[in-house]
């Protein structure tokens, strides 16, 4: 062997030739759109998470549309996944709008209920008929309602804004029977009629109504009298368009000149007062 003979070279590993113009598929946008669309849609089913559904749905829709652009350019191969992700993003957006409407409506209803519980239903006064002998029934005030905060007079009506109306008659002298409770010897008893008319569209539970009275200039408590004729109070339910009348009797000092009757129709209504001359 010649001294100039070169040793054999190691064989290089075979590498397949690269196809010109071929790139790896860029399917990331479609997959991300699908994942975000699924999460956004599930979030949209819970109205409280409407904000999350809106954000994820918008991102999923944008990514899905961008992914479809890649598919059209031949840069991605997951056309179905991309389209489905965009559709889910749109569904999540719709659910977020619906959830927002539901939440805002619920909050508004709660605020209205709380405001109603705190303020109650206010009443305006409707002057009663049959008291034409009073000079207050003529002149410039004729035909005008009194303010809700004014004390009413006998036979006036407190008309609440929901349609409920309460009317208290003038006070009339009353003689309790021998077994009456609440009457003190030496005092005088007076009877009043309380009428509640239900002009609302719902049933009214009259059991909630309470009637109290104070007598004289000092406003001492006038005890309610119970006997065989008066003292039963309101009971039962009043249908829309119907009314209920109950007789009450109160014990007042002999020198009392007026009787203030306060009627509260229930928790949702403000109490109204009538100043009755004795």
Image: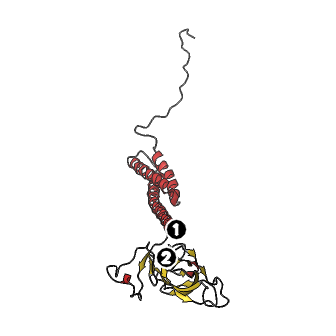
In the displayed orientation, state which residue is furthest to the right: 179
Quarter placement of the N terminus: top right
Above or below, 144 relative to 120: below
Estimate the x, y position of residue 227 in percent, counting from the top left.
64, 88
Under circle 1, the secondary element is: helix
Q: Nearer the viewer, residue 212 or 187?
A: 187
Above or below, 95 relative to 151: above
Under circle 2, the secondary element is: strand
Estimate the x, y position of residue 42 in percent, counting from the top left.
53, 57
- Quadrant of the rendered structure where residue 90 is? bottom left
Estimate the x, y position of residue 144 in percent, counting from the top left.
35, 79
- For marks 1 and 2, the one nearer the N-term is 1
In the displayed orientation, state which residue is furthest to the left: 140
Disc 1 and disc 2: Cα gap in Å? 20 Å
In the picture, measured across the screen, residue 245 lies left or right of residue 75, that is right
**Colouring scheme applied when the structure was drawn:** secondary structure
Above or below, 234 relative to 30: below
In the picture, measured across the screen, residue 65 lies left or right of residue 175, that is left
Q: Which numbered tag is attached to residue 117? A: 1
Q: Nearer the viewer, residue 87 or 44?
A: 44
Q: Which numbered tag is attached to residue 251? A: none
In the displayed orientation, state which residue is furthest to the top: 3
Instruction: Evaluate whether residue 79 shows in this view.
Output: no
Identify the residue position indicated by label 2 in the image. 273
User: Which residue is rendered at x = 61% and y = 90% of the image?
Assistant: 229
Q: Nearer the viewer, mark 1 or mark 2?
A: 2
């Amino acid at each position: 062997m010649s001294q100039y003979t070169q040793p054999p070279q190691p064989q290089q590993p075979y590498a397949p030739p690269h196809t010109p113009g071929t790139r790896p598929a860029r399917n990331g946008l479609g997959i991300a759109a699908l994942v975000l669309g699924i999460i956004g849609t599930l979030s949209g089913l819970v109205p409280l998470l409407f904000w999350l559904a809106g954000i994820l749905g918008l991102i999923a829709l944008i990514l899905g549309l961008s992914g479809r652009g890649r598919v059209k350019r031949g840069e991605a191969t997951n056309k179905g996944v991309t389209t489905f992700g965009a559709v889910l993003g749109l569904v999540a957006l719709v659910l977020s709008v619906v959830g927002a409407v539901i939440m805002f409506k619920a909050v508004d209803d709660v605020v209205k209920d709380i405001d109603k519980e705190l303020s109650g239903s206010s009443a305006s006064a409707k002057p009663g008929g049959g008291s034409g002998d009073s000079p207050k029934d003529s002149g410039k005030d004729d035909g005008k309602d009194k303010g809700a905060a004014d004390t009413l007079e006998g036979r006036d009506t407190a008309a609440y804004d929901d349609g409920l109306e309460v009317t208290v008659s003038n006070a009339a002298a009353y003689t309790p029977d021998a077994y009456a409770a609440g009457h003190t010897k030496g005092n005088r008893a007076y009877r009043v009629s309380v009428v509640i008319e239900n002009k609302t569209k719902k049933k009214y539970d009259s059991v909630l109504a309470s009637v109290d009275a104070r007598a004289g200039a000092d406003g001492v408590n006038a005890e309610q009298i119970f006997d065989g004729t008066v003292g039963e109070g309101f009971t039962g339910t009043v249908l829309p368009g119907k009314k209920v009348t109950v007789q009450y009797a109160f014990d007042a000092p002999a020198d009392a000149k007026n009787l203030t009757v306060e009627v509260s129709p229930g928790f949702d209504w403000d109490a109204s007062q009538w100043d009755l001359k004795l």
